[in-house]
Image (cartoon, rainbow, N blue to C red):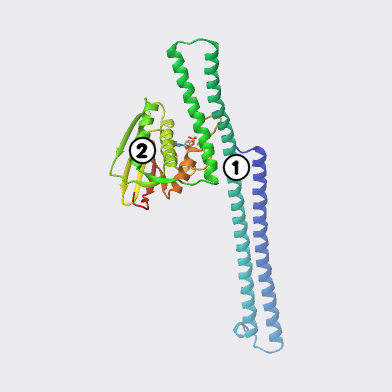
Amino acid sequence: MEKPRNIQLRLLSYGVIAYMMLAFAWWSVLLFTKNRDAYQAKRDHMRIVMIAREEIPPTDEAFYNTTAFRQLKHQYEKQEYMILGEASVFVLSLAIGVWLINRGYHKEMMAAQQRRNFLLSITHELKSPIASIRLVLETFQRRELPKDKAEQLTRNALLETERLNKLVNDLLLSAKLESAYQLHPEAVNLAQLMEDIFEQMEAKYPAASFTFNKQTAVEDTMGDVAGLTSVIINLLENAVKYSGDDPDIEARISQHGSTIRMEIADQGIGINEDEKGKIFEKFYRIGNEDTRKTKGTGLGLYIVNEIVRAHKGKIAVLDNEPRGTVFQIDIPVVKARNGT
Ligand code: ADP
């Protein structure tokens, strides 16, 4: 949300710009008419002098044919074009300046909003698993628990540590991606990798329906296994997270020529057209942190996009039918140099 003081400043600057435009238009019109008046006065004076000196007969035609008149007219027309040209350059520069300032301002506002969102979400994301783990440990300390209850609490605590671990890894990875990320390529079969991750996901989210669809044979390619694993996990976790109570997720993989295409499709809440370009920005989350229900940091898709780009691949966000989202990744096949 924009602060009232910022809105006031914005209105003030729009007012000043509008005033400048109007003033400039007024000065241009004035200059135009003054120039015309000066020309007409000079023309009439010149004509009277010529007739008085008997250089020409007193007819319009004779005067309009003189070189002196033609030169005067030419000069007048040149000045008119100059005024027009200068006015256009000025208005254009002002318009470009206003547009640039506005764009910078919007970017700054977005960045500030994202930083605020990030701080709010990271505080929540760090605090809530720590609080849960602490509660479990305190329960163990205070009383003896039946075996099944103890097991359930331990499972919960482990899930929370896994969440913390993912968060810290995402933070470290995104910091690395900004500065010193290096791929460690090795031969990997993406279809196999996807299938393995799918099995883990099925175990982790028993209520979700997962369908894995290998549409063609897929060659091995040189890729960073840790990075690509993170890409697939992030997309699948998002598909679950943004699908409500009964996630229905389909992953497809195929190879066309020297490109491997991976698609992860959900039947979830979908993504608006105007948000599709923004979700890959660091810390960007749709909506506002104060009202949001889902957990997250806005780092996942940033990491996904950077890793896909590091593999010279492309990622696209499409609408799924009848609803939901499809994340489509195209990765070029890179053959191992020694033929392995
Ligand atoms: P996070 O999930 O931590 O918020 P991401 O970078 O993974 O961050 O995603 C950015 C935003 O994109 C999310 O906040 C969410 O609003 C939107 N999003 C991502 N994946 C999906 C999806 N499969 N369906 C709907 N919205 C999604």
Q: Badge 2, how many Cα within 10 Å: few under 14, some, many 20+?
A: many
2 or 1: tag closer to the N-terminus: 1
Residue for point 40% across, 33% down: 268
The picture quadrant where one finds residue 59 is bottom right
Q: Is residue 137 above or below residue 292?
A: above
The picture quadrant where one finds residue 27 is bottom right
Q: Residue furthest bottom?
A: 54
Residue 50 shows up from this direction: yes
Q: Nearer the viewer, residue 244 or 176?
A: 176
Residue 321 shows up from this direction: no
Q: Identity of the amino acid at label 1?
A: Met
Badge nearest the viewer, 2 or 1: 2
Q: Label 1's element?
A: helix
Residue at the disc numbered 2: 194
Q: Identity of the amino acid at label 2?
A: Met
Q: Residue 313: where, in percent of width, then height?
A: 41, 48
Q: Nearer the viewer, residue 64 or 8?
A: 8
CB atoms at circles 2 and 1 under 8 Å apart?
no
Residue for point 43% across, 48% down: 311
User: In the image, 190: left or right of 4?
Assistant: left
Residue 304 has which mark?
Answer: none
Residue for point 65% across, 79% down: 72
The Cα atoms of the two marked residues, 2 and 1, are separated by: 38 Å
Q: Is residue 2 above or below residue 340?
A: above
Residue at the disc numbered 1: 109
